[in-house]
Structures are given as C-alpha cells and as structure tokens.
Image: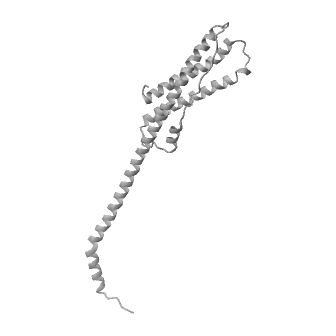
Amino acid sequence: MPTRDSSNAPRLRQRLADKLPEILIEAGSVLLALLLALTASVWNEHRQDLERADQARAAILAELGANRNEYTKSADAVGKVIKDLQAVAGDPESVHQMSVNIPLALLSEAAWRTAQTTQAFRDADYAWMIRVSRCYELQGMYMQMQWSVLQQLADIESIKIESKADLAKQLLGRIRVLADLGNGLHAGYADLLGTP
C-alpha cells in the first residue's frame, strides 16, 4: 500500500493558490453569463407582452368600430319606429300605418373576451381598460334590451290589446329605453374611437 507523501500537500496547496484567480474569473464569467441570459429573457418576455397588448388593443378598437357601424344601422331604424309609434299612440282613431321594423345590431365582444382570457393586458393602461370595459357593459345592456324588444314583439299576439294606440303604448316603453341605451353606447364608442 502506497503511503502518502507529506510533501504533496504543500504542493497541492500551492497549485490551488496559483489557480485560485483563474477559478474565480471563470466562476465570475459563468455568473455574469447567467445574469445576462436572465436579463435578456425578461426583456424579451416584456417585449412580447407589449406586442400582444398592442395587437389586442388594435383588435378591440377594430371590433368596436365594426360594432359602431352595426349599431348605427339599427339606431336609425329605432328612431323611425319611435316616431311611428308616437303618432299612433297619440291618436286612438289613427289609421296611420304602424311599422315596427328594427334590424338587430349584432354586436361582437370576441376580441374583448379573448384579450381578457389570454391576459394580453398585463401592463396596459388601466384607465383605458376601464373605459373599454364600460363600453362593453353598455353594449351588453343594449343587446339585452334589443332581445327584450324582440321578445315583446314575438309575444304581441298573446296580449289582449284593444287598439293600435294601446299596442303602440305597450311597445314605446321598451323601445325608448333601447334608444336611450343606444345613445349611451354611441357616446361610449365616440369616447374610444372618436367621432365618425
């Protein structure tokens, strides 16, 4: 069995002492490389988040623009229906032709929901997000009232109404609420998109 030479220990210590600056430089280089890689990764992730937020914002604004165009077509018809119903409701003996023709405004919220689901707005402008959220809430209320008017029109035959004037009075309430919600929605669109 070989015996340890006691003279090897001082030589080993001396070699380690000589190599220590080189070892520290290598360890520092590895640490610096890790820090740089981590910084680059964080910066790249933040850049991707900003790109995703910009894409989501553009999609939401495009969707709201299309919704405003869809709403405008319906709003013009709602105004005409209100005038017709007011004419009939004001004159019980009226022979005025009553027409309730309101095209449905098919308003989308797909871009908004997708942005929420994908958390595309982690670093977005909070005030802008609140304005957009309010607009979509108004849009939802408008859609609900629109369906309520449609349901009332569908159920009109089951209601016992004596005259056209009574029928007009029945319909006017919901259609006026629809018009009022529409005015608020139009203002919400203008706030986010500017005036057309």
- Specify whether residue 159 is in view: yes
Q: Position of residue 14 (x, y in %)?
A: 26, 79
Image quadrant containing the N terminus = bottom left
Residue 138: give x, y in percent of width and height.
53, 29
Is 158 displayed left or right of 78 in the figure?
right
- The one of 33 and 86 positioned closer to us in this rendering: 86
Residue 169 percent location from the top left of the image: 65, 14
Residue 170: image x %, image y %?
66, 17
Q: Could you tell me if residue 134 is visible in this image?
A: no
For residue 37, what is the image quadrant? bottom left
Quadrant in the picture for residue 177: top right
Indicate whether 54 appears above or below 44. Answer: above
User: In the picture shown, does residue 97 fall above or below 129?
Assistant: above
Q: Residue shown at 70%/12% (left/top)?
A: 163
**Quadrant assignment for the C terminus:** top left
Q: How many marks?
A: 0
- Asked if residue 115 lies left or right of residue 147, the reply is left
**Residue at (31%, 87%) from the top-left corner?**
6
Residue depicted at 30% across the width and 81% down the height: 12
